[in-house]
Image (cartoon, grey):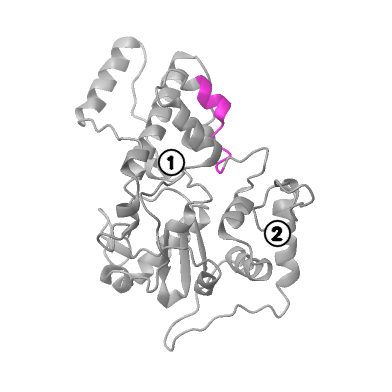
């Protein structure tokens, strides 16, 4: 297995990767099935009083797979996403050809195309040194660990993060840990619901947000909320015979499908120590200073695709629009 990635071929003339792209899902799950009954136990050291994380079989097999192959994190991300030399898109629902047609007049089309082609690359102003002592989670996350656990599993099921065993940190020393917090969520009880905050601004002066190159991220264009009313009036004026309705949907989930580049995901990690769990973000987290600008590009893509559907210029499936 080549350590350089998971693509069909790399630059070396005699080096071929072990898992051709067409066989990635089948080979991974065949290996997982073959090892499910063997004596491959995770190499864990749990502190007294801690509980073993109740992971899905997928996550458990993934951890054992990494221990066996010693696969680098970027290669694992590309393997799971199905990224290949001929199709390196992290999100297969984002189709560059469709985006080029729908957003042809968008001034930042090149940046949008790059996100679709490879994900968001994170640029830093200085080298990020390995952590000698990763920070603990905030008290709110410790006190409401059941909510933190539930939210992490939800993101894992949506393939927007990895939830792995903490001992894998020894294989990936480049991983940067930032603390989690939990805040109240409107309309829910504090004991059962909450919003996870990945505090990428901690510690002050030496955080991921501090290291991020602000000049390399798109600038978000904030508009007053009356822009919604103005858009409704514009649509009514242009289409007087149509019934104007507000599109409902989980916009948060749509934004969270903006994938991080495989070479940058190691900067967006956290821990749930009581669960012996390592959480690695695969999509732009809300706590990152660059997320608003990256989401701005997706907002424009959604707006333009909606306008084009209304005028009959093109048709896009719902999966493409929200991907």
Residue 240 visible in rendering: no
Residue at 32% in and 61% down:
193
State which mark lies toward you, 2 or 1.
2
Residue 118: percent from left, percent from top: 54, 40
- The extreme bottom residue here reads 48
Looking at the rendering, the stretch of residues picked out in magenta corresponds to 90-101
| Residue appearing at x 50%, y 70% in the figure | 169
Mark found first going from the N terminus, 2 or 1: 2
Residue 88 visible somewhere in the drawing: yes
Q: Residues within 10 Å of mark 1 (few under 14, many from 20)?
A: some
Magenta stretch encompasses residue 119 = no
Up-down: is 181 above or below 15?
below
Residue 147 vertical placement versus 319 (above, below): below
Please name the residue that numbered disc 2 is placed on: 28
Q: Nearer the viewer, residue 107 or 40?
A: 107
Mark 2 and mark 1 in contact? Answer it, CB < 8 Å. no
SS at mark 2 in the image: helix
How many numbered marks does the figure carry?
Answer: 2
In which image quadrant can residue 199 be found? bottom left
- Coordinates of residue 266 in the picture (x, y in percent): 47, 58
Which residue is under mark 1? 254
């Amino acid at each position: 297995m080549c350590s350089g990635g998971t693509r069909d071929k790399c630059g070396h003339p005699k080096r071929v990767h072990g898992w051709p792209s067409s066989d990635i899902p089948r080979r991974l799950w065949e290996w997982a099935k073959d090892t499910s009954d063997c004596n491959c136990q995770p190499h864990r050291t749990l502190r007294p009083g801690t509980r073993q994380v109740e992971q899905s079989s997928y996550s458990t097999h993934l951890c054992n797979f990494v221990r066996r192959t010693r696969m680098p994190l970027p290669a694992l991300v590309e393997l799971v996403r199905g990224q290949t030399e001929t199709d390196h898109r992290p999100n297969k629902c984002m189709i560059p050809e469709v985006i080029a047609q729908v957003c042809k007049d968008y001034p930042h089309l090149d940046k949008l195309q790059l996100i679709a082609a490879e994900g968001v690359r994170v640029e830093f102003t200085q080298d990020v040194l390995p952590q000698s002592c990763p920070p603990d989670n905030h008290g709110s996350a410790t006190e409401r660990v059941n909510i933190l656990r539930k939210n992490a599993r939800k993101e894992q099921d949506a393939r927007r993060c990895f939830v792995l065993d903490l001992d894998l940190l020894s294989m990936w020393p480049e991983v940067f840990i930032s603390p989690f917090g939990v805040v109240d969520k409107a309309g829910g009880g504090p004991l059962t619901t909450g919003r996870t905050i990945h505090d990428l601004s901690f510690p002050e002066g030496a955080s991921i947000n501090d290291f991020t190159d602000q000049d390399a991220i798109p600038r978000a264009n904030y508009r007053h909320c009356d822009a919604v009313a103005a858009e409704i009036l514009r649509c009514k004026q242009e289409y007087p015979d149509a019934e104007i309705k507000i599109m409902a949907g989980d916009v948060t989930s749509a934004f969270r499908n903006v994938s991080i580049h495989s070479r940058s995901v190691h900067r967006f990690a956290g821990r749930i120590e009581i669960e012996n769990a390592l959480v690695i973000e695969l999509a732009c987290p809300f706590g990152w200073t660059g997320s608003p600008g990256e989401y701005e590009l997706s907002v424009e893509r959604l707006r333009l695709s909606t306008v084009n559907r209304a005028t009959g210029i093109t048709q896009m499936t719902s999966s493409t629009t929200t991907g």
